[in-house]
Amino acid sequence: MTDPAAFTSVPAPAAIVARERATLAPYAMYSSGSRGRRYAEPPHAYRGPFQRDRDRILHSGAFRRLAYKTQVFTGDLGDYHRNRLTHTLEVATVARTLARALRLNEDLVESLALAHDLGHPPYGHAGEDALHACLAAQGGFSHNRQGLRVLELLEQRYPEFPGLNVSAEILDGHAARIDKHLDTGNLIEVQVVEAADSVAYDTHDADDALELGLLTLEELLDIPLWREAASRVRVRYQGLQGKTLRRALLHELIDWQVSDLVAQAERGIIEHAIGSADDARKSPTIVRASSPLLEQKRELERFLFDRVYRHADVLRLRDEAQSSLQAMYQGYLARPELMPERFRERAASDGIERTVCDYLAGMTDRYAEREYRRLFAAA
Ligand code: MG
């Protein structure tokens, strides 16, 4: 957990306090219980703290740039598949559904969901692996760790302080992803976002791979998770085929997983007698798929790993992305004057290697491509 002494709590507006008291479950995270912000700020007249966090994240440059960052498939492959922004919005919408069903703090859930991938560099996990290799001697690079740097340091929105000065609960929730401290010790709001991420990518990566022709529907229907979804769909509709069947399956997969998570969470809340946010922090994670479904999800993930994430077309783009990022890293290291001034200034305190990676990680895929061609590609 972030150092409690370093935060100053900000009173929530009375209308927000009353609204939360009337609508949230006892185990939810209430605005009035927030540990506050690193830099003291006056309260807002009518927006609660987590509502302000959500707005800050949404208005950040890092958030807008998610639109041109790879989720799994790059923009060269077409316009159907998810990018990192649409993935983030799918996570947020699933997470809000879970939050509302469980009467959790939706503003906090939405903030955590919208921020969850802010630290992703261009080119998805290929980009992350490339930067990790570049920074091997400096402790490496991870998108989760980078997300905290974005929230606390790299976004410059206010004259008084660096970063977005979001609430401690946002930083703690994000930090849990870094240590993979996800089995215990987290608010239910944090757990819900983690579960929603998995619902979203398991479903949409398969859908994108179908659209791109990397898989066929018949192959997916051999996987137990999809097979069971198909039998559920057939109860309601007979004779669906092709894209109509595919859409019904996607709908069913999300609905089934979300309903399972809600039931599991409700059971866990009773079983562990979770009656407050503090209880949630002391309990094991309760928002997790039931064991048969979890096993089916793992099997789907293994299948997607072999057939999609390791597909020859995906690997080829991955190699290209990694070599261009590595060349850019070396290039900016050798000629830091090519970076904007605010990055050059930070090099004095954070080291040139970390600073170059901060600059590269903030780029969109297309900006990185353009800069690579403009500055570093062999003529
Ligand atoms: Mg994600």
Image: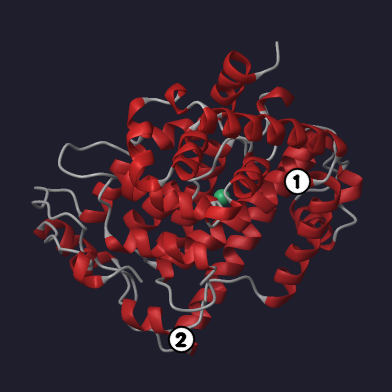
Mark 1 vs mark 2, CA separation in Å: 34 Å
Can residue 110 be seen at all in this image of the molecule?
no
Q: Dividing the picture into quarters, in which one does residue 276 lie?
A: bottom left
Q: Are marks 1 and 2 in contact (CB under 8 Å)?
A: no
Quadrant of the snapshot with the C terminus = top right
Residue 218: give x, y in percent of width and height: 91, 46
Mark identifier at residue 206: 1
In the orientation shown, which residue stands out farthest toward the top?
A: 379
Q: Look at the picture and state if 222 lies above or below 282.
A: above
- Relative image position of residue 120 (x, y in whole percent): 53, 43
Q: Secondary structure beneath disc 2? A: helix
| Residue at 81% across, 59% down | 302
User: Residue 220, image x and y in percent?
Assistant: 85, 50
The residue sitting at 20% across, 38% down in the picture is 158
The amino acid on which the numbered mark 2 sits, given as a three-letter code, is Ile
| Pick the front one: 266 or 115 | 115
Sequence-earlier tag: 1 or 2: 1
Residue 337 located left or right of residue 366? left
Residue 104 pos. (x, y %): 37, 65
| Quadrant position of the N terminus in the picture | bottom left
Mark 1 vs mark 2, foreground winner is 1
Residue drawn at x 43%, y 73% as measured from the top left? 186
Which structural element holds mark 1? helix
Q: How many marks?
A: 2
Q: Amino acid at mark 1?
A: Ala
Residue count near mark 1 (Cα–Cα under 10 Å), binned few <14, some 14–19, many ≥20: many
**Numbered label attached to residue 270:** 2
